[in-house]
Image (spheres, rainbow, N blue to C red):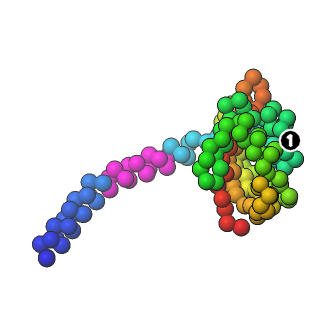
Amino acid sequence: MIADGRGRLLRTAVIVALALPLLTAGSSWGRGTFDRLHADDDPVAEQELRRLEVVFSDAFNRRDAATLDLLLAEDFLYTNEQGSVSNKAQYIDFVVNHLRVVSGGIGDLVVRVDGDPAVVVARFDGVSIIDGQRISDSFRFTDVWVRRSDRWYVIASQNSPTPR
C-alpha cells in the first residue's frame, strides 16, 4: 500500500513539475495578450449600436416583422436558451406568431465595437406569453452586429437564462 501511494505521489509530482512551467508561461502570455487586445474606441458606432438595440427591442416587443427584416442579416442565426438554432425567417415567424411581450425591457447594455463587427451584451427581464403560456422571463443575450455597405445588421443572437 505504501509503495502504491508513493508511486502515485511521485507521478503527481512529476506531472506538476512538468506542467507548472507551461501553465505559468501560458498564463503570463495570455495575461499580457489580453491586456493589449481590446475593442476599438469608436463612440459614434457605439451610440449607433445602442440606438439600434432599442429599435430591435421595440420591434421585438411590438412583433414588427418589417423592422426585424430590416435589422437582421439574410444569414442571421438565433440560438435560444435550449440550444435550438433558427434562421431569419424562423425567428421572425416565432416572434410575430408565437410570442407576445406583456412587459419588460433590456438593461445592462455593454457594447464592444471592433471595426465592422460588434458585440452587444445585455439583459432582458419581463413577462411574455409564448403560445398562450404566460412566463416570467429573465435572460442575458448576446447580439453580434456587422457593418455591411455602411449599415449595421444583426448576424447572430443567443440567449442564456439568468436567475431573477
> Where does residue 153 sit, x and y in percent of width and height?
74, 33
Q: Position of residue 63 (x, y in %)?
A: 84, 45
**Direction from residue 35 to residue 129 in the image, left or right:** right
Write the start and end of the magenta stretch as one range.
20-32
Q: Which quarter of the rendered picture does the N terminus lie within?
A: bottom left
SS majority, magenta? helix
Q: Callout 1: few (<14), some (14-19), or many (20+) C-alpha neighbours within 10 Å?
A: some
Question: Relative to residue 92, is residue 61 depicted above or below?
Answer: below
Q: Residue at x 24, y 63 (%)?
A: 12
The C terminus sits in image quarter: bottom right
131 vs 113: above or below: below
Q: Is residue 160 left or right of residue 47?
A: left
Instruction: Look at 62% across and 43% down and name the residue there.
Output: 85
Does the magenta run of residues contain 159? Answer: no
Q: Can the viewer see residue 41?
A: no
**Residue behind mark 1:** 64
Query: What percent of the width, then of the height, locates residue 93?
Result: 76, 41
* Residue 29 located left or right of residue 15: right
Q: Is residue 102 visible?
A: yes
Amino acid on which the number 1 mark rests in the picture: Asp
Q: Nearer the viewer, residue 15 or 56?
A: 56
Front residue of this view, candidates 98 and 149: 98
When asked about the image quadrant of residue 17, the answer is bottom left
* Residue 135, picture quadrant: bottom right
Seen at 72% across and 26% down, the residue is: 148
* Residue at the outermost front position: 132
